[in-house]
Image: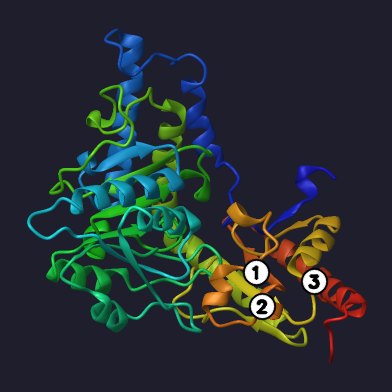
């Protein structure tokens, strides 16, 4: 099957490259190949391009350009923010701040880091997320302790798309002198992201979620904080992340962020229309359940569970029809365990196993949604006929 015939509805996993991003990247893969740290003009061209991308991102997200640091992607940004903040806070003043608060349904790029920190003496409190897929600020306030140093809660969940009250959480954290990190890999380019208004100290950005290249991202670090290095060995990124920069990827990221923010209002309106069309069609399938509330949700995300079938079988049958979806995070797609996100919502294992994540983008067409809604009911019906779990 040709790529042009594929219906791609897994944009939370990755996105196609924007033509404008590709055009911006190409010169830095060919003629403008100089090392940004070199003093001659070929190197200075690359350094100028990096500076421009930093300015584009800072202007689009309302922060100082000196607060944007380029990384290899969202997972790296999460690791850098959480590990380095924890190390600094553990040695802060007379009271070591070795208590961290997060939520039960964070991305594993955060949860696995927290598990590692627990083995070295940190205490971690995971807030519940409830059936609607949102944390409660009141729960955070109760969980805060004198030795709490860091809160890390994602802006929008990667599996069910629910948006968290980060600005309110940030206000509580700053009132108590606690640092706040948010993983905004899914939200940047999907909803308005104003870093100043969110009251965050650290914010993660991922390129390939917004039509930029894979392998590039950024971390916002509040300039009031004297932060530690992630990688040592060079003076790149103002001495905090050594290694020759991915110039083409960074240039593409700058264009992708600007393009996403500039066109956000029109794209959002269209995505909401597509989402409602999808939702209206899917709920007609017997014993289908929307995971998380439809309010406070990314306009590009729907996550449904279908009783009596396995999510993996559903994906394979859709793939045979030329349709790409997922049953959860792409980072854990090889796992046979039900999604930890859906279990955190209180879903039983047998229903959590039958989940389907449908995520659209600005390139998704009405015809593709129509075709998906034609195919899905038949696939669900055939799988239920074969399933020992299905009991009408």
Q: Tag 2's secondary structure?
A: helix
The residue that appears at 24% across and 48% down in the rendered structure is 87
Q: Tag 1's secondary structure?
A: loop
Left/right placement of residue 91 relative to residue 346 reads: left
Q: CA distance from mark 3 to mark 1?
A: 21 Å
Q: Are marks 3 and 1 in contact (CB under 8 Å)?
A: no
Looking at the rendered image, the disc whose residue lies closer to the viewer, 3 or 1, is 1
Which residue matches tag 1? Answer: 338
Which quadrant holds residue 338?
bottom right
Dot 1: within a 10 Å radius of its alpha carbon, few (fewer than 14), some, or many (20 or more) residues? many
Looking at the rendered image, the disc whose residue lies closer to the viewer, 3 or 2, is 2
Left/right placement of residue 72 relative to residue 40 reads: right
Q: Which mark is residue 376?
A: 3
Dot 3: within a 10 Å radius of its alpha carbon, few (fewer than 14), some, or many (20 or more) residues? some
Question: Residue 90's x, y, as percent?
Answer: 20, 53
Q: Quadrant of the N terminus?
A: top right
Q: Tag 3's secondary structure?
A: helix
| Residue 342, above or below 371 | below
Outermost residue on the left side: it is: 94
């Amino acid at each position: 099957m040709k790529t042009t015939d594929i219906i791609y509805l897994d944009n939370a996993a990755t996105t196609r490259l924007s033509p404008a991003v590709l055009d911006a990247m190409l010169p830095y893969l060919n003629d403008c190949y100089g090392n940004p740290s070199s003093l001659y003009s070929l190197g200075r061209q690359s350094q100028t391009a990096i500076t421009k991308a930093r300015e584009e991102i800072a202007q689009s997200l309302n922060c100082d350009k000196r607060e944007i640091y380029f990384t290899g992607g969202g997972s790296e940004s999460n690791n850098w923010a959480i590990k380095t903040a924890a190390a600094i806070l553990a040695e802060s003043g007379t009271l070591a701040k070795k208590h961290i608060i997060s939520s039960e349904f964070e991305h594993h790029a955060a949860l696995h880091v927290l598990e590692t920190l627990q083995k070295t003496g940190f205490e971690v409190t995971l807030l519940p997320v409830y059936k609607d897929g949102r944390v409660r600020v009141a729960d955070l306030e109760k969980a805060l302790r004198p030795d709490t140093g860091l809160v890390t809660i994602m802006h929008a969940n990667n599996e069910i798309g629910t948006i968290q009250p980060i600005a309110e959480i940030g206000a509580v954290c700053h009132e108590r002198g606690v640092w706040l990190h948010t993983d905004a890999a899914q939200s940047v380019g999907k909803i308005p992201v104003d870093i100043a208004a969110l009251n965050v100290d650290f914010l993660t950005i991922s390129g390939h979620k917004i039509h930029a290249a894979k392998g590039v991202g950024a971390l916002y670090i509040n300039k009031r904080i004297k932060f530690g290095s992630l990688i040592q060995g060079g003076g790149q990124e103002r001495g905090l992340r050594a290694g020759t920069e991915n110039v083409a990827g960074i240039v593409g990221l700058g264009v992708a962020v600007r393009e996403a923010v500039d066109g956000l209002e029109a794209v959002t309106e269209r995505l909401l229309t597509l989402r409602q069309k999808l939702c209206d069609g899917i709920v007609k399938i017997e014993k289908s359940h929307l995971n998380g509330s439809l309010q406070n949700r990314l306009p590009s995300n729907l996550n449904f569970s279908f009783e009596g079938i396995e999510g993996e079988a559903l994906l394979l049958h859709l793939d045979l029809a030329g349709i790409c979806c997922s049953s959860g995070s792409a980072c854990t797609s090889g796992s046979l365990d039900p999604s930890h996100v859906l279990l955190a919502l209180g879903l039983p294992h047998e229903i959590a196993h039958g989940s389907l994540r449908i995520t659209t983008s600005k390139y998704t067409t009405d015809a593709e949604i129509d075709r998906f809604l034609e195919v899905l009911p038949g696939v669900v019906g055939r799988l239920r006929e074969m399933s020992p779990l299905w009991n009408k």
